[in-house]
């Protein structure tokens, strides 16, 4: 790793801040990507990410990995019962969580680090429920975040497709990257079996809302299942599409 990761604590949460290779050498300001589920998505793909920096395929970024405290509560937009008695209910505290990220964590990061603070320079990304809550941020805080990475986002979540269909969403300058594996949900006997068709439906709705081809992208990986290895593999591509090196993209 040519950059470095700094361990921080904000509001009682563990935060991992990745600073890119050139950060220490100058006074430039950097786009920031807020990443769900801690730092595993960028730490595990760091060799490829830094390679993209060096080749000019991806702007150098600051990544902020946020450890969840109660994942099923924080990464869901409203209450829903558990899928089985082996798991806890989905608490629906997503608005509170995003209020922390947008209203407490981001100002703290902006104050301590050299960041570009505009929405188009501020991303939020996650996998599975982390992708779901990242999309929810587009509805609640469109003036804060302008780049959204949805890696196998849980579009099966009860009521989510209806919400996407009913609610307006800012599309003028926002970009949304979506990914799903073709094998996700095929082994499920519950609502999670709708993972792929609901992802496709969400993509179609967002397209109808005015997101053009350069503002919305869906990648479907043949044979890929709902596993962390696929999320990690896809992370560099997602960030490179959201933050290409070309100025004005």
Image: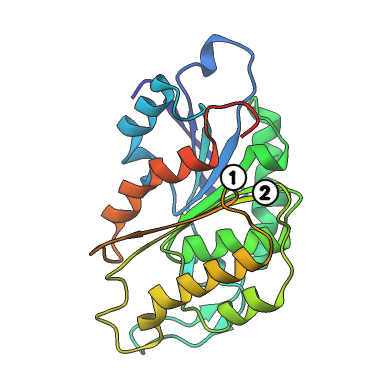
The quadrant in which the N terminus is found is: top left
Can you see residue 39? no
37 relative to 42, above or below: below
Q: Is residue 224 left or right of residue 203?
A: left
Image quadrant in which you'd find residue 21: top left
Q: Position of residue 80 (x, y in %)?
A: 54, 85
195 relative to 7, above or below: below
Q: Is residue 21 left or right of residue 184?
A: right
The quadrant in which the C terminus is found is: top right
Q: Position of residue 103 (x, y in %)?
A: 73, 50
The reply to whether discs 1 and 2 touch (Cβ–Cβ < 8 Å) is yes
Q: Position of residue 25 (x, y in %)?
A: 53, 10
Identity of the residue drawn at 60% across and 27% down: 30
Which residue is nearer to you in this view: 155 or 40?
155
Q: Which mark is residue 123?
A: 1
Determine which residue is flagged by label 2: 145
Identity of the residue drawn at 62% across and 54% down: 212
Q: Secondary structure at mark 1?
A: strand
């Amino acid at each position: 790793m040519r950059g470095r990761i700094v361990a921080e604590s904000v509001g009682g949460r563990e935060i991992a801040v990745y600073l890119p290779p050139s950060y220490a050498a100058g006074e430039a300001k950097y786009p920031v990507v807020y990443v769900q589920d801690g730092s595993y998505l960028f730490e595990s793909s760091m060799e490829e990410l830094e390679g993209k920096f060096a080749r000019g395929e991806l702007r150098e970024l600051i990544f902020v990995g946020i450890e969840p405290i109660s994942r099923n509560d924080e990464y869901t937009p409203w209450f829903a019962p558990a899928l089985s008695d082996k798991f806890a209910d989905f608490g629906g505290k997503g608005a509170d969580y995003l209020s922390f990220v947008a209203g407490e964590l981001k100002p703290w990061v902006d104050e301590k680090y050299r960041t570009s603070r505009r929405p188009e320079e501020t991303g939020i990304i996650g996998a599975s429920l982390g992708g779901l809550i990242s999309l929810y941020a587009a509805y609640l805080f469109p003036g804060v975040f302008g780049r959204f990475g949805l890696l196998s986002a849980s579009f099966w979540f009860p009521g989510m497709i209806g919400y996407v269909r009913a609610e307006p969403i800012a599309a003028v300058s926002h970009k949304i990257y979506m990914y799903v594996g073709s094998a996700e949900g095929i082994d499920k006997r519950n609502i999670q079996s709708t993972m792929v068709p609901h992802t496709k439906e969400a993509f179609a709705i967002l397209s109808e809302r005015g997101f053009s081809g350069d503002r919305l992208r869906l990648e479907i990986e043949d044979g890929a299942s709902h596993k962390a290895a696929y999320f990690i593999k896809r992370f560099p591509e997602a960030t490179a599409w959201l933050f290409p090196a070309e100025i004005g993209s």
